[in-house]
């Protein structure tokens, strides 16, 4: 592998001084700063689009993003002898966003809002493969809801039920009801949106995987990394995913939730329609589905205690979660 990495790095216009192994990647200290070499799964067209997107962000104030480094042949990707595809990007020293630190969380949210603002102005034509259909989330939630029922029916048919299965059945009706209500709300939103031409107001390029691991803090500022999953979608989907993960770790703390909303809103004001979309993303009982799905796909003969732990934690947080949802979705 060492040889392979060397052969790939020789295709680039920099001198490598030292390399260290990262998670599935090679971090290179070069005469042109830190770089990272990583295998790349997408198409060359997508890499070319990503190159333009990251350059645009950099020119418009987001100076610490992981821009793609082109090869000596002016290509965004490099191939090894076996046809493996690799990409080299700028890299930064720093620590990941600390999910226990309110200050880190709010700064990361402000950064996201700024990125969304900049990406709304991007002059590049959005390729088809980047566009997420407006039915995609609805279809996903409908599928998850059907899967919840399938798990319930399976558990119901088991003669001997363990603690996890008993706990799941006990809480099923409540969360299944929530799932159905969110799906109905989504259908209503889609109908209303098709009557008015509101697509441009809420759609834009999203990061696609905005989480604490992709936000680095250093003395030079915040770096935002790993835009490979970028898509053209409802931008608050990034905010919803980040908020849900953080709030689950903070027992759906209402004060923190509202501070996160303010931190985003102060940089990029949210419309009523976007608030409804955010509500939909936070109100679907995603975690309950994830726990059920994990249980169903694992060996039923041996249910990991972690499943029961996660289920109990999710149920215990639900009152706080409901209160926060009620606060932000009081118009529903």
Image (tube, rainbow, N blue to C red):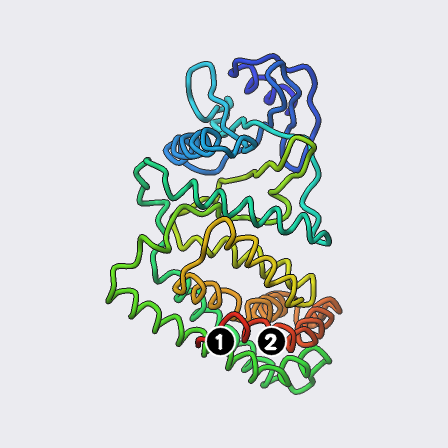
218 vs 189, left or right, is: right
- Residue furthest toward the right? 305
Q: Nearer the viewer, residue 96 or 78?
A: 96
- The image quadrant of residue 300 is bottom right
The residue depicted at 54 percent of the width and 28 percent of the height is 89
Position of the C terminus by quadrant: bottom left
- The image quadrant of residue 1 is top right
- Residue furthest toward the front? 266
Structural distance between the alpha carbons of marks 1 and 2: 10 Å
Residue 284 percent coordinates (x, y): 51, 70
Does dot 1 land on a helix, a strand or a loop? Answer: loop
- Residue denoted by label 2: 323
Residue 258 percent coordinates (x, y): 59, 63
81 vs 5, left or right, is: left
188 vs 103, left or right, is: left
- Residue denoted by label 1: 330
Q: Earlier in the sequence, mark 1 or mark 2?
A: 2
Check contact, mark 1 vs mark 2: CB within 8 A.
no
């Amino acid at each position: 592998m060492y040889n392979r990495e060397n052969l790939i790095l020789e295709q680039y216009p920099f001198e490598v001084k030292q390399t260290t192994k990262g998670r599935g990647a090679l971090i290179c200290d070069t005469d042109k700063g830190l770089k990272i070499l990583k295998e790349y799964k997408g198409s060359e067209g997508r890499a070319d689009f990503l190159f333009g997107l990251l350059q645009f962000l950099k020119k418009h104030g987001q100076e610490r993003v992981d821009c793609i480094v082109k090869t000596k042949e002016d290509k965004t990707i490099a191939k090894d002898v076996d046809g493996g595809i690799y990409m080299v990007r700028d890299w930064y020293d720093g620590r990941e966003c600390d999910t226990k630190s309110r200050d880190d969380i709010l700064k990361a949210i402000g950064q996201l809002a700024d990125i969304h603002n900049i990406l709304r102005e991007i002059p590049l034509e959005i390729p088809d493969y980047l566009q997420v259909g407006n039915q995609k989330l609805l279809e996903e939630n409908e599928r998850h809801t059907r899967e919840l029922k399938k798990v319930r029916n399976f558990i119901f048919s088991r003669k001997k039920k363990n603690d996890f299965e008993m706990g799941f059945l006990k809480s099923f009706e409540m969360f299944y009801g929530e799932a159905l209500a969110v799906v109905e709300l989504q259908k209503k939103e889609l109908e209303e949106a098709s009557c008015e031409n509101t697509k441009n107001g809420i759609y834009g390029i999203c990061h696609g995987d905005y989480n604490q691991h992709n936000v680095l803090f250093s003395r030079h500022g915040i770096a935002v990394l790993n835009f490979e999953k970028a898509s053209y979608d409802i931008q608050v989907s990034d905010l919803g995913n980040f908020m849900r993960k953080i709030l689950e770790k903070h027992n759906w703390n209402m004060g923190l939730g509202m501070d996160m909303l303010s931190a985003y809103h102060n940089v990029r004001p949210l419309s009523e329609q976007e608030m409804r979309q955010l509500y939909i993303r936070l109100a679907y009982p995603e975690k309950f589905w994830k726990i059920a799905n994990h249980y169903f796909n694992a060996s039923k003969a041996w249910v990991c205690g972690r499943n029961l732990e996660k289920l109990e934690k999710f149920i215990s947080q639900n009152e706080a979660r409901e209160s926060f949802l009620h606060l932000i979705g009081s118009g529903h």
